Amino acid sequence: MLIKTLPNLSAQITAVASQVPELAPFAGYLGATFGQVRQANKNDLILLTASSAIGKTTTLPTGVPETLGVVGVTYPLGDALVLLPSEQQAITEATKLLIRSYVRLPLQKTFRWRI
C-alpha cells in the first residue's frame, strides 16, 4: 500500500532495478510506483470501499507488463483505502470529542405523537 509519509526510496529502487536486465526496461516505473510502499499488516484497516478497487487493473506505461497492474495484488493499494493506526487513533479521538460534546447538550423535550 502506498503511504506518503514513508521515506521515498524511488531512487534506490530504480538504481537496483536498472542493474537487473529483466527489470531495466521499466526500472523508472518500479522506482516511482514502489518508492513509498509497504505491505499491509494486522494493524492496518482496509476500508470496505477498497473492494471496488482490489483486483482491478490500472493503466500502465508502455513496456510495463500488465501483470504489474493488478490493484492490491501487484500494484499498490492507494493510501485513501487504508487506515493506518495513527489515522485510526485520530478517528477515535474525534469520535470521543463528538460524543462528549453531544452529552453536554441541554436536554430537549421529548417529542410526543398525538393521536
Image (cartoon, rainbow, N blue to C red):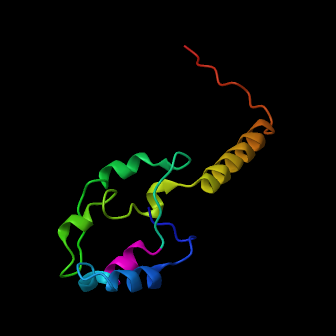
Can you say whether 1 is above or below 14 in the image? Answer: above
Q: Main SS of the magenta segment? A: helix
**Which quadrant of the figure has residue 39?**
bottom left
Front-lying residue, 113 or 59? 59
Left or right: 36 as drawn, with respect to 85: left
Left or right: 66 as drawn, with respect to 33: left
At 47% from the left and 54% from the top, the residue drawn is 40
For residue 32: magenta?
yes
At 61% from the left and 55% from the top, the residue drawn is 87
Can you say whether 110 is above or below 63 in the image? Answer: above
Q: Give the range drawn in magenta.
A: 28-35
- Measured as percent of width and height from the top left, residue 93 is found at 71, 49
Left or right: 25 as drawn, with respect to 48: left
At 33% from the left and 85% from the top, the residue drawn is 19
- Measured as percent of width and height from the top left, residue 32 is found at 39, 80
Front-lying residue, 109 or 55? 55
At 44% from the left and 61% from the top, the residue drawn is 1
Can you say whether 101 is above or below 70 in the image? Answer: above
**Which quadrant of the figure has residue 84?**
bottom right
